[in-house]
Image: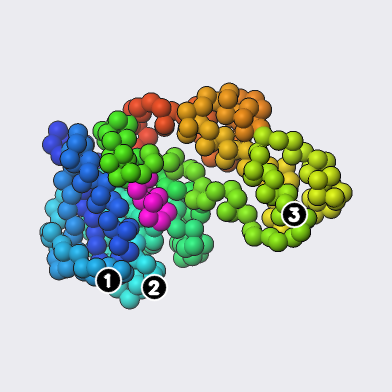
Amino acid sequence: MPHRPAGPGPQHVTVFAFEGVRLMDLSAPLEVFTTAAQGSGSYTVQVCTPDGQAIRTSAGLRIEADLPADRVERTDLLVVPGPAHVSTLAQHPALTDHVARLAARSRRVASVCTGAFLLAAAGLLCGRRATTHWEHASDLARRYPDTAVTPDAIYIQDGPVFTSAGVTAGIDLCLALVEGDHGAREARRVARDLVVFLQRPGGQSQFSAASRTPVTRHPALRPVLDRIAADPAADHSPHTLAKQAGLSPRHLTRLFKDQAGTTPAAYVETIRLEAARILLERGETVTAAARQSGLGSDETLRRAFARHLGTTPSAYLARFRTARTGADFGVGTEKLRV
């Protein structure tokens, strides 16, 4: 698909709706872009359906269409929300053809949640990195081995194709697109209007570190995990943790691997990294976040960010303090493969 540079007029956003689509996957992009259109963000937003008729969402609410899919002549952004049940897609194979044809008329394509399955079926994710809701990531990777699925990311950009996890991640992605198109100030305005937090960087995990840890009621390990989460900056060396648990360091390490799937040191670093991230979002400097989280130095924090988030603390901090140029989310010259 040839690259079409954005003109001076409004950018056209087309959201593709179909029977069984998840309501919030559909409504979240509509809210973000229509809210942006009310400010300095220049957008026109339309909903298309396969035949131009109203559809019923997974929540039972009927949504009217602005036009049928085959009447969409050109759009700057195609948004494909997902169904509540992936099995819905197998029951309606024509949806894939609609997405492929719509994508051929669009400069950018974005999916929310299981909408990634439609992009993959249409050939849009071949050779690309992508994500989806954590519950369906392994299924996406199995069905489409030519797609590099990142199961825990909030959203991912690979060229002109964007994929995101469930509901709130779709909001994060759409806010990031608004920021790339119209700057951070406009994205912040939209976020404030919708009473949501300014979008999280795409590489951030879909879950907090504590919620990703398997539940354990082991009488020795549970208090250790709670103690680390309650005070990340405290002394949590393996020797100290073992002493507090009344175990040998070797026994504690075996218990961590068995119950939490990691080592004591790795778990402590993950909790401290999350604490540092929250401190940065609250306005602390990189140095203060490193010290208060227990990571200690700027360099230690930088290495942890690189390992776990694929970015730097200063770049992360910039997302919450300064306007970005929008280069990361600008439209490249790469062609969409359909």
Residue at (72, 58) in percent of width and height = 259
Quadrant of res 97: bottom left
Question: In the image, which disc is placed on residue 60?
Answer: 1
Q: Residues within 10 Å of mark 3 (few under 14, many from 20)?
A: many
Choose between 241 and 116: the one closer to the eye. Answer: 241
Question: Type of residue at label 3?
Answer: Leu
One can see residue 142 in this view:
yes
Q: Which residue is mark 3?
A: 221
Question: Type of residue at label 1?
Answer: Gly
Please name the colour scheme applied to the rendered image: rainbow
Quadrant of res 298: top right
Q: Secondary structure at mark 2?
A: helix
- At which x and y percent is residue 75? 19, 48
- At which x and y percent is residue 72? 15, 55
Query: Is 335 left or right of 259, judged from the image as shown?
Result: left
Q: Earlier in the sequence, mark 1 or mark 3?
A: 1
